[in-house]
Image (cartoon, rainbow, N blue to C red):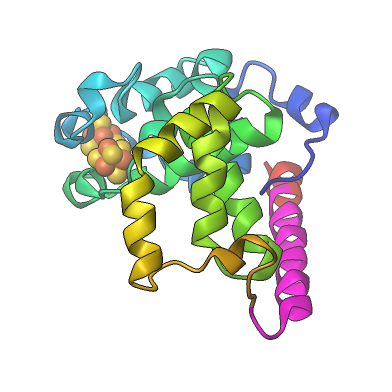
Amino acid sequence: MGGGINPAMIEKYRNNFLHEVRDNVEEGEWVKMCMQCGVCSGSCPLGPYWDHPPQEIFQMIRANKREEVLSSNAMWMCTSCYNCIVRCPRELPITHIMHGLAHYAKRLGLVPKGQPTFRFAEKFWDNLTKKGRVNELKLGVSLYFLDGFVEGTKVAYKLKMIGYNMLRTKRMNMLELVGGHGIKDLKGFHAMLKKARELEDKRIANNASNG
Ligand code: SF4
Ligand code: SF4
């Protein structure tokens, strides 16, 4: 997930966050089309609980509030329910922009400390890319112990009967903890990820030089 950011490239956008988003964020070119009707924020099931619902985020981008947007928790809270997309009168791909902003904040190292979705995303990505498939047992255990050994032990103890029943009914295999099985062409899978990263970096660099 993510590559480096050239500081000189960022400097180019000083005082023009809208253009920075247009060139560096997935679907970011759509932000300028927002007419601030508020339908997305009103449709978002979680919007009222965020620091900034989508309409506000788009307004802040245009108002050049770069640090506030990129260090916000808002885009990490999006559950991809797509309510906003289907209702936006301007057909903005709001969900994708929110995830694009989250990804860009990650690339810049501006994610709020301890952000839970980010922590989960990192664990999930590491787990998935290691063997080309999700090792659910390892992922679950790593999430239990995200906040330390004591917390992890408490959660594991609390859920012990569920674990026991899963073992008993062969829904869980403890051997997955020591290695686990992966996909056939793991080398090809890693080469594909590398290529995708290169293409994405190239696309961003092209956008920036044409912007
Ligand atoms: S629904 Fe669309 S046009 Fe309206 S505020 Fe949201 S993004 Fe902007
Ligand atoms: S996709 Fe995300 S931003 Fe859109 S309504 Fe759902 S949670 Fe809110």
Whether 154 is among the magenta residues is no
Q: Which residue is located at x 51 percent, y 41 percent?
A: 143
Q: Which residue is located at x 51 percent, y 33 percent?
A: 152
Depth order, front residue of 178/107: 178
Position of 163 with respect to 141 (left or right) is left
Q: Position of residue 207 (x, y in %)?
A: 68, 48
Main SS category, magenta section: helix
Position of 199 with respect to 72 (left or right) is right
Position of 54 with respect to 192 (left or right) is left
Whether 187 is among the magenta residues is yes
Depth order, front residue of 76/23: 76
Q: Position of residue 101 (x, y in %)?
A: 52, 36
Answer above or below: position of 158 versus 127: above
Q: Is residue 31 visible?
A: no
Magenta stretch: give its range.
183-204
Q: Quadrant of residue 50?
A: top left
**Number of on-image labels:** 0
Looking at the rendering, the quadrant in which ligand 1 lies is top left
Depth order, front residue of 91/77: 77
Depth order, front residue of 130/140: 140
Q: Is residue 197 visible?
A: yes
Q: Which residue is located at x 39 percent, y 73 percent?
A: 170
